[in-house]
Structures are given as structure tokens and as C-alpha cells.
Amino acid sequence: MDRKSTKDKPLSEKTTEDFAHYFQTTYTPPDIKKARKRGRDKIEVHYDFEISDNLRQIGEGKKFLIRTYGCQMNEHDTEVMAGILTEMGYEPTERAEDSDIILLNTCAIRENAENKVFGEIGHLKSLKVEKPDLIIGVCGCMSQQESVVNRILKKHQQVDLIFGTHNIHRLPNLIQEAMFSKAQVVEVWSKEGDIIENLPKVRHGKIKAWVNIMYGCDKFCTYCIVPMTRGKERSRRPEDIIQEVRHLAAQGYQEVTLLGQNVNAYGKDFEDIDYKFADLMNDMHKIDIPRVRFTTSHPRDFDDHLIEVLAQGGNLLDHIHLPVQSGSSYILRKMNRKYTRESYLELVKKIKKAIPNVTLTTDIIVGFPNETDEQFEETMSLMEEVGFEAAYTFIYSPREGTPAAVQKDDIPMDVKKERLQRLNELVNKQSAASMKSYEGKTVKVLVEGESKKDDTVLAGYTEKNKVVNFKGPKSIIGKIVEVKITEAKTWSLNGELVKKAIEVN
Ligand code: 5AD
Ligand code: SF4
């Protein structure tokens, strides 16, 4: 593969042909065999993204709407696409009827996420009939799947543009093509692209920010489509991340969340430097920003050095989201998680020893193919043994192209639903107990704004990510304050303002 041929051209001048090495055809289906063999091609980092002059005014007087489904990675991709569209002259709108371009940034993780998107595509049909010049685009993880692309091409002519997760920086050119092409425009690279550093962003708020630290996933959990939709693991250079976080701190941001499908694998792909996630967190600790979170971590790569770094505290918050997926070592092996119940519990023990006040939350899948009652009970007991304060729980959803999807499954859906309900009852019980334990305590709250339900009340988040509602002056929005908790509700806490603004660190 010769990447040099296009290397000297600025990104904005490259054409579809310049990227031909990325796709065998316009798109390929998720293929685990191919994905596993993906090459060790060196990833190039580009700093020269630019929107060419002829595309800069294309959106003047026009409006865009992006609907986002799924995870934080998608939320952040939406901020990038909003940045690109804004530089093209488009203005944001919340109303589909006022839009000139609507993008659906989709999620493929479970079938119901996909169904929602197809429902939305259906709804947009009548709007497209009314406004033929409206551009409807589908992007995100669903567009990386051949079956989805085919279904849209066959049945949903109202969609003008389909582009993949590796093609976001191509948005200006793709919009131009969609404007002038009679046919539906499809650009989905099956192979991950390079890292493009200087993409514009319109961030969702001025208090908290997402910061990507890596892209893709190489873990290949047998149920998961992500390694196919997001490509191989590629880490951003430390200096670029540090600069971005410093810049956010200088702009007054109070909190950053470092994002990756598996942040603990950060840096494993560097060939020239030995710099891992623990080193990055250590550098984050030195930056003058009050709160640093990260998501999502994989238990496998959670090493002692990282625990040691996190134990320093300060702006590294003592809340760790550590997806366990199942409490049964047998099921974990079938999921290719590469740890056991015992080794997970051992890791939890180490973390709790080093960070005694730590809050642990998790993700759990119930009803993995042929999961027995006993194996499910092991998940229930692990939930209690660890004492997770919250958990995202899901019924296993077969994803085409993943190894688990071809397994015969003897467990009926109503059994799976019953298990999910039992698990959720336990999660709610543990969550309620942890909320109750805050009553009478004083906590630090980052004030985000007025409560959605009552504008005389302010709302913010504790270090452990619990919502707190309390009365106070609007001038403290964006600040960290001390609040005494007076009452625990199921999903939030009520309190009274103690101290208007506190020194951090
Ligand atoms: N079915 C159900 N849940 C899934 N997840 C990932 N893939 C699937 C699937 N096929 C869950 C995992 C993961 C979270 C983001 O989504 O728990 O941690
Ligand atoms: Fe999916 Fe597993 Fe990668 Fe998470 S670590 S994105 S569950 S393959």
C-alpha cells in the first residue's frame, strides 16, 4: 500500500481517488476475519485539514440539524460535524422543518438503536417530499454495515448521503456531491483512516468537554460490532491531547472526559515512544483543570501503574466505570473478555485498596447465547460483591458479522427479560442505598445550569457524577460549589448551598 503518493497534497485538495487505497469497493461488510488481520500500517497524523474556499460559503443562509444516537464518542463526533458545518456557513437549528441538511449520527451497538434510526428515516420521508432540496445524511456506526447501506439504498430513497465513521473530515466534499448528484452518495471506508488533528468543533457547552484520546478497538469481544465499525486502535499523540486539555482549561472549562472505546489500551500502538494511559493521566493530573474523567476502560489493561496514578486524586476523580459484562468466568470466556470473575474481583480489590473512597459503575449484558440460570446468578452475586453504585444493563442483541451472532441460542426472550428485570431491581436497590448514604454530607458540585424541571433551582454533578438540585444564585453556574445534601431521591439528590465557590485541588 503506497500512502506516499498523496502525502504531499493538503487534505482539502485530495479527491475520492486519492483515498482509493482505503476501500476495496465503496464499502465492505463487517468481516471479523479481515478485521482481525488488519495491518500494522503506520498511522499518519494530519494537521492540515482545511475547507477549500469554494465550499466555505455553501451553507450561507442555510440551517443544519444533527440527531445523535448512542455513545459519547458519537456525541463528540457530532460536535466535530457541527464545527465543519459551521465553517461552511450553516447555522444550527432544533427544528427538522427549518433544516437544509439533517444528519443522523447513528449507533449500531444493539438492534433497538438501529430500529430507532430506521423509524426516524421513515418520518423524514414526508419532509423530503415537501422540501426536495433538503439533504438527509446517515453517518456513524450503522453506515459501516453493508446490510444497512443496502437497505437504505433500496428502500429509503429520501436519504441523499451515507458516510462512515472514518469519513467525517470529508463532509464538505460529500455535501457538495450530494447537492449536485442525482444518485445517492455513498462514501464508507472499510479501513480506518489516519488521525486528523485540527478538525473544527462546536462544543455542546462551556463547562464540560469531551476529548478523544484514541479511536477504534482491537479487543474483539465476540458480541460487539465496534471493532468493525470503528476500526483498529489508534492513539492521538500525547502532546496534541495535552495541548487540547490545556486550551480547554484556559477557556474556563471545568471538566474533561477523555474518550476511547478502551482507554486503557491508549499508547499501545506507539512505536517510537513508551507512553501509556497511566502516563497520560499523570500528565492530566498536572494540568490546572478541576476535573478529569475517562470512559470506557477495559479491566484487562487496568494496570498497577494506572491505579497508582489515579490514587493521587486531585483532579483525577475517584469514579471508575469498569464494564464487567458478566459475573461468570465461562460466559466471560465465550465473550472473549480475557479476564475471569476472580481476576476482575482481584482488580476491584486492588483499586479499592489504593482508592478507598472509589465509586465503581459498570456495564452488564444478560442473556448472552446459552447463558444458564447459574451463570446469570453469578452476575447477580458479583453485582453485590463489588457493590456497584450504578450499572448500564442490556439484553444481548445479536449483531451481524460478530462471532456470537452465529451461535445457536436456547434461552427464550422472556427468560432474558425476566433476568434483566431482576438485575435492574438489584441495581436500583444498590443505587438507592448509595444515594441515601449522601444525606447529611457536604459534596462538591459543578453547577451546570438551571434544573430542567424548575428554573428557580440549579443543577450540577458531584465528583461521582450524581445529579444535585439546590437553590442558589445564577452567578455560580459553571463553578464548583459545596452543597449539603438534605434528601436522596432515586436518581438525584436535593441539597442546600454551603459555599459559593471553592478553590480546587
Ligand atoms: N448486545 C447487548 N449489549 C451490547 N453491548 C455491546 N454490544 C452489545 C450487544 N451486542 C454493551 C456492552 C458495552 C456497552 C457499551 O454496550 O455492555 O459495554
Ligand atoms: Fe466492544 Fe469489547 Fe471493544 Fe468495548 S472492548 S468496544 S465491548 S469489542
Image (cartoon, helix red, strand yellow):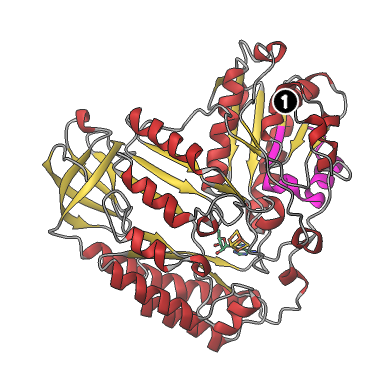
Identified at 68% across, 11% down, the residue is: 53
Q: Position of residue 452 (x, y in %)?
A: 34, 38
Q: Position of residue 481 (x, y in %)?
A: 18, 41
Mark 1: few, some, or many residues within 10 Å (few <14, many ≥20)? many
Residue 22 belongs to the span the image colors magenta = no
Q: Is residue 280 above or below residue 253?
A: below
The segment highlighted magenta reads 137-159
Specify the quadrant that holds the N terminus.
top right
Q: Is residue 452 left or right of residue 294?
A: left
Q: Position of residue 104 (x, y in %)?
A: 65, 37
Q: Which residue is mark 1?
A: 135
Q: Nearer the viewer, residue 415 or 215?
A: 215
Identified at 62% across, 11% down, the residue is: 60
Furthest residue in direction bottom, as rendered: 374
Q: Is residue 272 left or right of residue 209?
A: right
Q: Quadrant of residue 251?
A: top left
Q: Is residue 336 left or right of residue 348?
A: right
Q: Secondary structure at mark 1?
A: strand
Q: Position of residue 156 (x, y in %)?
A: 80, 39
Q: Is residue 207 visible?
A: yes
Identified at 68% across, 57% down, the residue is: 227
Identified at 50% across, 59% down, the residue is: 264
The quarter of the image that holds ligand 1 is bottom right
Residue 152 belongs to the span the image colors magenta = yes
Q: Amino acid at mark 1?
A: Ile
Q: Is residue 353 above or below residue 107?
A: below
Q: Is residue 55 above or below residue 105?
A: above
Q: Quadrant of residue 223?
A: bottom right
Q: Is residue 390 visible?
A: no
Q: Nearer the viewer, residue 386 or 257?
A: 257
